[in-house]
Each structure stands twice: as C-alpha cells, then as structure tokens.
Image (cartoon, rainbow, N blue to C red):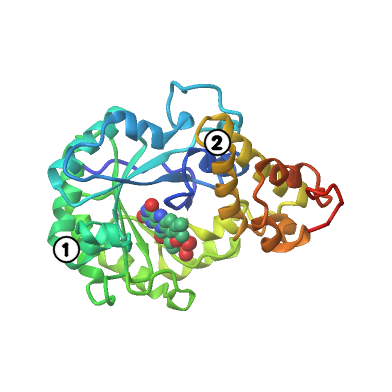
Amino acid sequence: MRRPLPFTAPALLAPMEGVTEPCFRDLVLARNPPTHLGGAFTEFVRVVDHPVPRTVLRRHLGPSARPTPFGPPSIDPQSFGPRPIGLQLMGSDPAAIEASAANAADLDVAVLDLNFGCPARGALSTCAGSALLRTPARVTDLVRAAVRGVDGRVPVTAKIRAGYDDDRGLEDVAKAAADGGASMLTVHCRTRAEGYRDDAVDWRRIERAVRAVSIPVCGNGGVETHADIERMRSRTGATFVMIGRGALRDPWIFGGGSADADSARAFLLEYFDTLVLRGQFAPAGALDRCKQLVRVFRAGNIVEEQGGPKAWLAEVDPVRFRARLVDPAPAPSATGVVGAK
Ligand SMILES: Cc1cc2nc3c(=O)[nH]c(=O)nc-3n(C[C@H](O)[C@H](O)[C@H](O)COP(=O)(O)O)c2cc1C
C-alpha cells in the first residue's frame, strides 16, 4: 500500500550532495514557513553491497529530523513548525537497499527517496544513479526492495532524470518507478547527458511524466524564481516542485520575499557558525563550505556589494571571512589598512 506523503506545501528543497547537510537544511527551513517550504531532502547516501548503518543515516538526518536531538542546535529549524526530511539512498543492490531502507524506517524518517539521476562517474561505475535509467526493470526492482524494507512505515519516492542519453525512455522509467510502489516521482527535466545545462531545461518532459503515471509527480529543473514554482505546476500538472540551485542563489525563494542585506549576511554567518558549533567542520572547512555557497549566493546582493565573488573567494582566513559577515565594511587587511591588498 502506498503511504500518504507528509509534505506541508508543494515546494521542496532538492537533495544536493555537499550542500544539503543538516546545517544548511535547517537554516533554509528556519527561514521558510511550512506553507511555503513543504519539506527537504538529505544529500544521497551511497549504498554499496551492505546495509548502511543507522548511525550513518542518523548523521545525514541531523538533530532536527530526530525526536531526540544530539545537542541543542544553534538555530531553531522548527521555529516555523516541523517539516518532513526525506532521506535519499543511491545504490544498485536490491538486498542492500532493502536492508538500508529498513534501517531508515527504524529511525522514523518521513520519506525514503531513491536516486536514479546522479550523473557522476562514481555512480555510473557502480551502475547506480542515472546508470539505472537504461534498465527500467531494475528501477522497479530497487523501488520494490525499498518498499519491502520500510514495510509500510514510510512512503518511498523515486527521483529520476528525463533519460540517460536522450528522453525517449522517460515514460518507461516513470512507469517502472510507479510499478515498484513509489508514492511520488520526482523528474529532473534534463537527461544525464545534458548535465546541468540551462539550455536543456524542458518542462514538457515533466508533463509527459505526469501523463504517464497516476502517482503525484514532483517537477524539478530550472526553477529560478518564486514565480517559476507556480508556473511549473500549472504548465506541467506536477503536484510538487523541487528546487535545487535556485535555493542556493536565494534561500528565500520558497516564499517569494526578498531578503535585505542584513538578513542575507545573518544567513551566511549562521551557516558558518552552525557548521563549526555542531562539530561538523573545523573553521577552515566551514570557510570552504561558505565559499562554495558564496559562488552562487545572490540574496540581499551582499556578495556583489562587498567586492563580488572574487573578493570573498580570495579570503583564506576563516576569522576575516567571518568578520565580513559581522561588519559589512571591508575587513582590515593583514597590514591593518582597510581595503589594502
Ligand atoms: C551540488 C549539487 C549536488 C547535487 N546532489 C544531488 C543528490 O545528492 N541527489 C540528487 O538526487 N540530486 C542531486 N543534485 C541534483 C538536484 O537535486 C537537482 O535535481 C538539480 O540541481 C536540478 O534542479 P535545479 O535546476 O533546481 O538546480 C545535485 C545538484 C547539485 C547542483
């Protein structure tokens, strides 16, 4: 039996490896009420040939996704009310997926998602992620294995791309996931071959998936503005919309309000501090994560106004980087001269 979906709104934060770990997710959840942001996903957890232990899954879910937190979070992601976090698994061995799904259900995850879209060489070399788009029968087997593993406790969802080299098999893969017992199908509207190219965004593929299956479809790919959320739903018939890089550019995209410079700086500051305070990264690691975000972050226009991405990325000292966020005036250089290079 398919389990009902727990999302509180149609717009969802996409799984993003190296980005949507618990700190980033919690910050986004804390700024978007449940009526705007309906849920979020972990980055993929790789499943090889043995079950992923509960301790590993718990780490991906983070403190806010658990009834018993590891410690007090420095931010309160529940300030707007609880939100479902989907745990994403990526693998190609049905037995290992089944056992890992059982472990996830033991942890009370809200949703279990399977990744059939990752284009990375590591995924392809183990015939996981988007490699499975070429064999719909294996997609059915893997979804079925996850459904067996969760044993009716958790809805299982699947995330696919429009195809491997081209989109001709889209309907077959969509049906394969539905046949396996998926409660929702997310369709990233680019093929594996198209990577993340802007010119490859084709929402008609989402509409094709909506017509092919009777389960709810979540459209994904190329949502750049708040207005795009409803635009995608009305053009394609998708029930849900998943946002990836648009939420990195602007974490407030779900509600449509625009953050002022102070709020945008506070976001980056809390990101840095939470990564360190939760023990996830040493300051140098937190700096790297923040710099990765700064490459695309456009909220409050602070990156542009404080020297542009180049100036932020040139900063190698975590303390000075953090100072940029506390005091918007240019941080003193090592020579003590403001603005000196
Ligand atoms: C840095 C990065 C990491 C990603 N990691 C994952 C992942 O772990 N699992 C997944 O299903 N998709 C992953 N994706 C794909 C996104 O979830 C999404 O499908 C894709 O970015 C298209 O949506 P967008 O155009 O809104 O960004 C990743 C994308 C990016 C940019």
Q: In the depicted view, which residue is nearer to us: 235 or 150?
A: 150
> Quick check: 299 left or right of 280?
right
Q: Residue at x 26, y 67 (%)?
A: 212
Distance of mark 1 from mark 2, alpha carbons? 43 Å
Query: Residue 243: which disc?
Result: none
Q: Amino acid at mark 1?
A: Pro
Q: Position of residue 84 (x, y in %)?
A: 43, 38
Vertical placement of residue 146 versus 179, above or below: above
Give the quadrant of residue 276.
top right
Q: Is mark 1 within 8 Å of ligand 1?
A: no
Who's the residue at 71% across and 59% down the image? 311
Residue 282's tag is: 2
Residue at the outermost front position: 335
Rendered image quadrant of residue 237:
bottom left
Q: In the displayed structure, does residue 202 sit left or right of residue 151?
A: right
| Secondary structure at numbered mark 1 | helix
Give residue 47's position: percent from left, percent from top.
24, 44
Amino acid on which disc 2 is placed: Ala
In this rendering, the answer to whether 65 lies above or below 217 is: above
Q: Residues within 10 Å of mark 2 (few under 14, many from 20)?
A: some
Residue where numbered disc 1 is placed: 136
Helix, strand, or loop for circle 2? Answer: loop
Q: Would residue 36 be seen by someone viewing this image from the given angle? A: no
